[in-house]
């Protein structure tokens, strides 16, 4: 969709749409306008969603101590590196195939994300399990274990009643070292964080899917 693209690509997409509209029928023009309107509405709703989510997520955060894949203690503050912001993925662990799908996608985009913010993945798996699994998947980002800590639950991604939830938290560290969570989101099929689902949406519905 147009609102996912950069400024230059957006102009090209718009030009292509305008060109096709000129040669299209009246009904085609109406459909094109409807699609553009829906695209704009989705973009605006997304902005509102992020603002509300940020207000809900806002909280001061302790400097939790987690484990790296070698079992060494690592403070949350150290995960920022030389960045002021940290994007932290709440992964449910090796046993979650959906979580692996999301993480595999992040591996390809981590290089670009890390130009603006630090990027790490945290799961409840033991460090040695994380190390072996991350290597088998070829992940190109850092992973940390929260096993034995309350970090995941404190961030709202674990409850005794429902277990673990996948998602992300974004943290900011100020000049005094104070850490604040500034936004968060949950993951699920069709969200903004895993590209394959959007391609699936473009495919025809199968007989099996119709019967569900």
Image (cartoon, grey):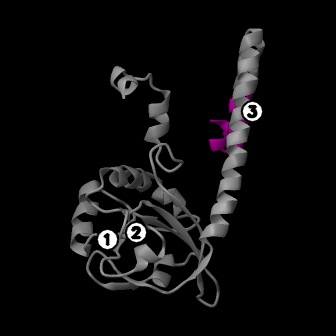
Is 129 drawn above or below residue 82 in the view shown? above
Q: How much space separates mark 1 and mark 2, taking CA atoms?
A: 10 Å
Q: Position of residue 141 (x, y in %)?
A: 40, 64
For residue 173, what is the image quadrant? bottom right
Q: Which residue is mark 1?
A: 124
Disc 1, SS? loop
- Residue drawn at (72%, 40%), measured in percent from left and top? 41
Q: Which residue is mark 3?
A: 37
Q: Position of residue 35 (x, y in %)?
A: 69, 28
Disc 2, SS? strand
Prevailing SS of the magenta stretch: helix
- The quadrant of the image that shows the N terminus is top right
Q: Is residue 7 magenta?
A: yes
Q: Check whether the beta carbons of the residues at disc 1 and disc 2 lie within 8 A of each other.
A: yes
- Binning the other alpha carbons within 10 Å of mark 1 as few (below 14), some (14 to 19) or many (20 upward) gives many
Q: Is residue 100 left or right of residue 196?
A: left
The magenta-colored residue range is 1-15
Q: Position of residue 82 (x, y in %)?
A: 54, 78
Which of the two discs, 3 and 2, labels the residue nearer the N terminus?
3
- Binning the other alpha carbons within 10 Å of mark 2 as few (below 14), some (14 to 19) or many (20 upward) gives some
Q: Which residue is mark 2?
A: 158
For residue 50, what is the image quadrant? bottom right
Q: How much space separates mark 3 and mark 2, taking CA atoms?
A: 38 Å
């Amino acid at each position: 969709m147009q609102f996912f693209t950069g400024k230059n690509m957006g102009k090209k997409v718009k030009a292509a749409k305008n060109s096709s509209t000129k040669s299209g029928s009246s009904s085609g023009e109406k459909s094109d306008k409807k699609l553009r309107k829906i695209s704009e509405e989705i973009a605006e709703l997304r902005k509102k969603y992020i603002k509300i989510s940020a207000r809900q997520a806002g909280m001061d955060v302790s400097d939790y101590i987690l484990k790296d894949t070698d079992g060494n203690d690592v403070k949350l503050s150290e995960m920022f590196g030389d960045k002021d912001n940290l994007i932290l993925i709440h992964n449910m662990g090796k046993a979650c195939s959906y979580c692996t799908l999301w993480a595999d996608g992040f591996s390809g985009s981590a290089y670009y994300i890390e130009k603006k913010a630090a990027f790490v993945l945290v799961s409840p798996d033991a460090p040695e399990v994380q190390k072996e699994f991350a290597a088998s998947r070829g992940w190109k980002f850092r992973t940390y274990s929260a096993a034995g800590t309350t970090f995941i639950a404190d961030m709202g991604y674990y409850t005794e009643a429902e277990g673990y939830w996948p998602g992300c938290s974004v943290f900011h560290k100020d000049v005094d070292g104070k850490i604040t969570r500034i936004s968060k989101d949950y993951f699920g099929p069709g969200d903004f964080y895993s590209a394959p689902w959007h391609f699936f949406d473009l495919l025809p519905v199968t007989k099996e899917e119709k019967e569900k």
